[in-house]
Image (tube, helix red, strand yellow):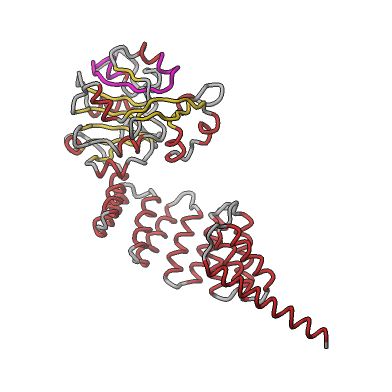
């Protein structure tokens, strides 16, 4: 079929996925486009409405975009509000081209909670008050059909809270595309299969879902992310063998994805199958192109739990050597092993290094340093470390106070002994 409008306006080719792969040459279906922008640029549903006579609802909170949306999508219901988990007034961060791209706008609370890359819009976006509505209430308001053929969601962090409260038992959404993976486990638990979009080769942040009622009737490639989420759901239900099998299936589906090996290894470690966990961690390191420090750190943790401290030390040292800004927990874990082995000079050096690079050193970091000083009989340094630990946290563990009290007592006795000796 030839399309009157230019297909592929959405950079992820979501529109092409729907019109050529999922519902080819199917007319008159129903869509929801949340985050519709101006209705044409970056739109996943423009072709559906313009060429295939689909109808639906477009949601766009940005006022400037909305003015263009109502002109560009005359056959859609257009709503200038936010989707949220409840009907309420929300603080919406609206982007302005002179400050930050308007496509990055979203509900402030959800941007902060669910988006790791929201710093720019949070710091530069203009705060405006917007009405918000749940997806279910929006569908009821416009008497939408109970079968929604396609839901496109790009609402900057609000996807999960919106879908978490959605009554999937009342409405059946057949195909969904969402930016980011935060909804994967939820949607898999609701009967969705995570699939590949054959027209999206490089923008892998976009996730694609088909309801199980139609998934097996389509020519689809199941994503490894489906099996990962399946494993996560089995894990949540404490179905151990099923979770392990799902993670293994994910590895079979995408054998060069080191993160999937990590998911399996960390779960095996939780189940105290340390031998298998160590093997899988080593496989992850072997295939990882970047070999991140935290991966060596997790391998070190597994070695440490096995009591194989020299191997744990080697893994932690490899982590620190691999990455200049290695997570500080790796330094602390390494210091703890040195302290356990009574290698106090090495323990103190690594604790001090961790504290120096950690913007907010933990209470126990100072406390463990204090213990090492205490074992060396360096009471002044130990007292200072314990006092720092207490000052760091509102309610520090009682043992830190006990150790500090013991140190002060010993220091007082030492001062008295020195005074008496000088008087003789």
The answer to whether residue 330 is left or right of residue 240 is right
Find the magenta span and give its range: 47-67
Q: Quadrant of residue 339?
A: bottom right
Residue at the extreme bottom: 424
Task: Write the residue at 46% across / 72% down.
Answer: 308
Count how many numbered circles sit on residues in the image.
0
In the rendered image of this protein, does residue 277 appear above or below residue 257?
below
Indicate the position of residue 138 as horizontal and vertical percent values.
28, 25
The answer to whether residue 355 is left or right of residue 204 is right
Indicate the position of residue 95 as horizontal and vertical percent values.
49, 25
Instruction: Indicate whether residue 55 is drawn in magenta.
Output: yes
The answer to whether residue 398 is left or right of residue 247 is right
Instruction: Indicate whether residue 45 is drawn in magenta.
Output: no
Quadrant occupied by the N terminus: top left
Indicate the position of residue 39 as horizontal and vertical percent values.
37, 18
In the rendered image of this protein, does residue 296 appear above or below residue 74?
below
Task: Write the residue at 45% across / 64% down.
Answer: 301
Q: Nearer the viewer, residue 379 or 263?
A: 379
Quadrant occupied by the C terminus: bottom right
Q: Quadrant of residue 305?
A: bottom left
Q: Quadrant of residue 99?
A: top right
Indicate the position of residue 193 as horizontal and vertical percent values.
25, 40
């Amino acid at each position: 079929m030839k399309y009157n409008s230019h297909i592929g306006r959405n950079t992820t080719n979501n529109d092409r996925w729907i019109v050529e792969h999922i519902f080819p040459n199917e007319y008159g279906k129903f869509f929801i486009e949340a985050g519709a922008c101006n209705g044409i640029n970056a739109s996943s549903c423009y072709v559906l409405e313009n060429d295939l006579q689909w109808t639906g609802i477009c949601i766009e909170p940005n006022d400037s975009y909305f003015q263009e949306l109502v002109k560009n999508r005359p056959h859609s219901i257009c709503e200038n509000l936010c989707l949220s988990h409840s009907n309420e007034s929300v603080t919406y961060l609206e982007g302005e081209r002179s400050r930050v791209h308007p496509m990055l706008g979203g509900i402030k609370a959800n941007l902060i909670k669910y988006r790791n890359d929201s710093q720019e819009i949070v710091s530069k976006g203009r705060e405006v008050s917007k009405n918000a509505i749940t997806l279910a209430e929006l569908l009821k308001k416009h008497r939408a059909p109970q079968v929604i053929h396609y839901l496109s969601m790009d609402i900057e962090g609000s996807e999960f809270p919106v879908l978490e409260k959605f009554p999937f038992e009342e409405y059946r959404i057949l195909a969904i595309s969402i930016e980011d993976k935060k909804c994967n486990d939820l949607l898999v638990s609701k009967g969705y299969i995570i699939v590949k979009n054959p027209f999206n080769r490089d923008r892998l942040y976009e996730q694609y879902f088909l309801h199980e009622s139609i998934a097996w009737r389509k020519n689809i490639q199941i994503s490894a992310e489906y099996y990962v989420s399946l494993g996560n759901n089995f894990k949540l239900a404490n179905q151990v063998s099923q979770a392990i099998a799902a993670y293994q299936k994910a590895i079979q589906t995408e054998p060069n994805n080191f993160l999937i090996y990590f998911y399996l290894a960390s779960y095996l470690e939780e189940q105290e199958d340390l031998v298998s966990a160590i093997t899988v961690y080593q496989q992850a390191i072997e295939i990882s192109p970047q070999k991140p420090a935290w991966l060596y750190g997790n391998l070190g943790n597994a070695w440490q739990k096995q009591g194989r401290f020299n191997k744990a030390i080697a893994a932690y040292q490899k982590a620190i050597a691999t990455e200049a800004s290695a997570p500080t927990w790796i330094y602390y874990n390494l210091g703890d092993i040195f302290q356990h082995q009574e290698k106090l000079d090495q323990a103190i050096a690594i604790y001090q290094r961790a504290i120096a690079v950690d913007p907010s050193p933990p209470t126990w970091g100072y406390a463990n340093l204090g213990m090492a000083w205490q074992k060396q009989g360096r009471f002044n340094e130990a007292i200072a470390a314990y006092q720092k630990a207490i000052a760091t946290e509102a309610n520090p563990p009682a043992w830190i106070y006990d150790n500090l009290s013991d140190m002060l007592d010993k220091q007082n006795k030492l001062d008295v002994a020195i005074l008496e000796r000088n008087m003789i």
